[in-house]
Image (cartoon, grey):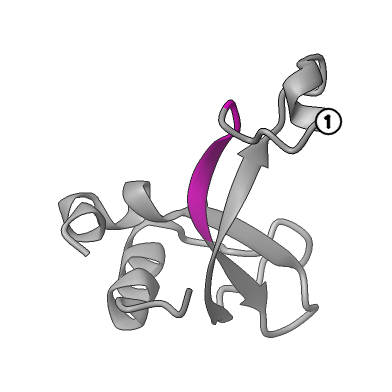
Amino acid sequence: MFLKHKDEIEKAISEKVSKICPLCGHSKFTIDGMEFHHASFPLNDPKFYEGDFSGVASIPCVSAICNNCGFIVSFSLPVLLGKEYNQG
């Protein structure tokens, strides 16, 4: 899913994080532009291996890429955007 709130996401990250990159400390970053989900799969549930993904939990995220070294970090969209994310 393409991000609807790219400008708001960049602003939220800039306000909440002083140094985006834990490797080089660089603060300039690029937002990937696509929403993705970190998922938790119930590997001990036999239904999972039969294609039943009903027990899968996921967190909607966005990637930020360091403009200096290329390190990629992910952020939770509901945490960054709060009510604005939930309203679409």
Give yes or no for residue 70 being in the magenta stretch: no
**Of residues 16 and 86, which is closer to you in this image?**
86
Q: Quadrant of residue 5?
A: bottom left
- In the rendered structure, the answer to whether residue 25 lies left or right of residue 31 reads right
Answer above or below: position of 57 versus 87: above
Q: Position of residue 65 (x, y in %)?
A: 66, 75
Q: Quadrant of residue 24?
A: bottom right
- In the rendered structure, the answer to whether residue 36 lies left or right of residue 83 reads right
Q: Position of residue 52 (x, y in %)?
A: 67, 33
Answer above or below: position of 34 versus 41: below
**Of residues 42 and 59, which is closer to you in this image?**
42
Badge 1 crowding class, 10 Å Cα cut-off, few under 14, some 14 to 19, many 20 or more, is few
* Residue behind mark 1: 49
Residue at x-position 78% and y-position 60%: 23
Answer above or below: position of 37 versus 57: below
Q: Element at badge 1? A: helix
Residue at x-position 75% and y-position 29%: 48
- In the rendered structure, the answer to whether residue 50 lies left or right of residue 64 reads right
Answer above or below: position of 87 versus 33: above
Q: Position of residue 88 (x, y in %)?
A: 22, 64
Q: What's the magenta region?
A: 55-61
Q: Amino acid at mark 1?
A: Tyr
Give yes or no for residue 58 being in the magenta stretch: yes
Residue at x-position 45% and y-position 58%: 17
Counting every numbered tag in the picture gives 1
Residue at x-position 48% and y-position 74%: 1
Q: Magenta segment, principal secondary structure? A: strand
Residue at the front extreme of this rendering: 50
**Of residues 75 and 16, which is closer to you in this image?**
75
